[in-house]
C-alpha cells in the first residue's frame, strides 16, 4: 500500500511590518506633515466648543476629519485630554479610534519616562493590540537613562509600533541639561543630547532597521543642532519628530537647512498653526501645510 504523501509544511506567516516600514510608506504617500491635536482652552473657545471633555473630544474628532486625505500623521497631546480625568481619557480613546479608522498614523505625545515595571505598564497601555489607547508610536523621555527604555522599545517593536525619544527639544529651558557633557568609557565627552542620538541610531542598526528605524528622535526645529553636538548627516535612517514649526517660529521652508540630508525622514509637527484656522478652515490649512512640506523636499 502506497503511503500517502506528506502534507506540505505550513508556511510561516509573514512578519508584520515594523513601525519604520509603515512610516516610510506614509512619508512616501502623504509627506511628512504631522498634525498636532492640542486642544488648548483658548482654541476651544475660538472654535465655539466648551472647555470640557466633550470639547476636547469634538475638536479632536474634527481635527482627524480635517487631516484625513490631506496628511498621514496626527499627534494628540495627551495632557489636554487627561486634564479631564476618566471623561478625558474616554474622549482620547474616541479620537484615537477615529484616527485608526481613517488610516492615519498616530503618535501619542505622552512623554512617558520611568523605570522597570512602570515603563512596562506604560508600554502595555499604549502598545497592547487590545488597548483602547493603542497608538502607532509614543514619545518617551530618556532622562532616567536610555537603558530604562529597553522594555518599552522591545515591546514596541514586538507589535510593530515605535517610540520617539526626547533628545534636543525645542523648549529653551532644556538647553542647559541637554548640552551638558557626559564622558564616554574612553574618556572622550559629548553632549547628553548627542549621547541619546547615538544610542538611538545604534539601537535601530542593531535591530537591523537600516532603511528607517522604529526608534526615532525628538529634535526641535528651533534648536541649533550643531552646537548641541548633533550631526544630522548621520540620521538619514532615523525618524525625527520635529516640533517648533509655525507658532514656535521655525519655518517649513528651512526644513533642509535645519535637518540636511535627514530632512526626508522628518515629521514636521504643527498644531496651533492649523488649529487656529478654526473648524471650517482647518482642512484647507492642513492641505496647504502638507503641500508646503512636500514642495520643500521636491
Image (cartoon, rainbow, N blue to C red):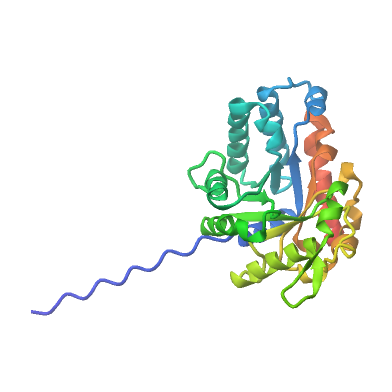
In the image, 78: left or right of 192?
A: left
In the image, 61: left or right of 1?
A: right
The quadrant of the picture occupied by the C terminus is bottom right
Q: Quadrant of residue 213?
A: bottom right
The one nearer the camera, 205 or 2, is: 205
Pinpoint residue 208: horizontal percent, then vertical percent: 60, 72
The one nearer the camera, 34 or 101, is: 34
The one nearer the camera, 112 or 148, is: 148
The one nearer the camera, 208 or 201, is: 201
Report if residue 170 is visible in the image. Answer: yes
Give the residue at the far left of this rendering.
Answer: 1
Q: Residue at x 62, y 49 (%)?
A: 114
The quadrant of the picture occupied by the N terminus is bottom left
Q: Residue at x 61, y 39 (%)?
A: 96
Q: Quadrant of residue 217?
A: bottom right
Pinpoint residue 103: horizontal percent, then vertical percent: 61, 46
Q: Total label count?
A: 0
Report if residue 171 is visible in the image. Answer: no
Check the image and report above or below for 232 versus 251. Answer: below
Pinpoint residue 265: horizontal percent, then vertical percent: 75, 61
Q: Residue at x 31, y 71 (%)?
A: 9
Pinpoint residue 47: horizontal percent, then vertical percent: 79, 25
Check the image and report above or below for 102 versus 227. Answer: above
Amino acid at each position: 500500500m502506497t503511503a500517502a504523501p506528506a502534507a506540505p509544511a505550513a508556511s510561516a506567516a509573514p512578519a508584520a511590518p515594523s513601525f519604520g516600514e509603515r512610516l516610510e510608506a506614509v512619508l512616501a504617500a502623504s509627506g511628512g506633515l504631522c498634525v498636532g491635536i492640542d486642544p488648548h482652552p483658548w482654541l476651544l473657545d475660538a472654535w465655539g466648543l466648551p472647555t470640557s471633555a466633550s470639547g476636547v473630544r469634538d475638536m479632536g474628532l474634527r481635527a482627524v476629519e480635517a487631516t484625513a486625505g490631506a496628511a498621514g500623521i496626527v499627534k494628540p497631546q495627551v495632557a489636554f485630554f487627561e486634564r479631564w480625568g476618566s471623561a478625558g481619557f474616554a474622549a482620547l480613546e474616541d479620537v484615537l479610534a477615529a484616527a485608526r479608522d481613517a488610516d492615519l498614523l498616530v503618535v501619542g505625545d505622552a512623554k512617558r519616562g520611568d523605570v522597570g515595571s512602570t515603563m512596562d505598564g506604560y508600554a502595555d497601555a499604549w502598545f497592547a493590540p487590545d488597548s483602547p489607547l493603542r497608538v502607532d508610536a509614543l514619545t518617551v523621555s530618556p532622562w532616567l537613562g536610555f537603558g530604562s527604555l529597553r522594555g518599552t522599545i522591545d515591546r514596541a517593536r514586538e507589535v510593530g509600533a515605535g517610540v520617539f525619544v526626547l533628545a534636543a527639544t525645542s523648549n529653551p529651558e532644556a538647553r542647559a541639561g541637554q548640552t551638558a557633557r557626559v564622558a564616554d568609557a574612553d574618556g572622550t565627552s559629548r553632549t547628553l543630547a548627542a549621547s541619546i542620538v547615538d544610542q538611538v541610531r545604534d539601537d535601530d542598526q542593531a535591530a537591523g532597521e537600516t532603511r528607517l528605524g522604529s526608534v526615532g528622535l525628538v529634535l526641535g526645529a528651533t534648536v541649533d543642532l550643531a552646537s548641541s553636538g548633533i550631526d544630522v548627516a548621520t540620521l538619514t535612517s532615523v525618524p525625527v519628530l520635529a516640533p517648533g514649526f509655525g507658532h514656535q517660529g521655525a519655518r517649513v521652508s528651512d526644513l533642509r537647512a535645519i535637518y540636511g540630508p535627514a530632512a526626508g525622514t522628518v515629521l514636521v509637527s504643527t498644531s496651533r498653526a492649523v488649529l487656529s484656522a478654526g473648524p471650517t478652515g482647518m482642512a484647507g490649512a492642513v492641505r496647504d501645510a502638507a503641500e508646503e512640506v512636500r514642495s520643500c523636499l521636491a
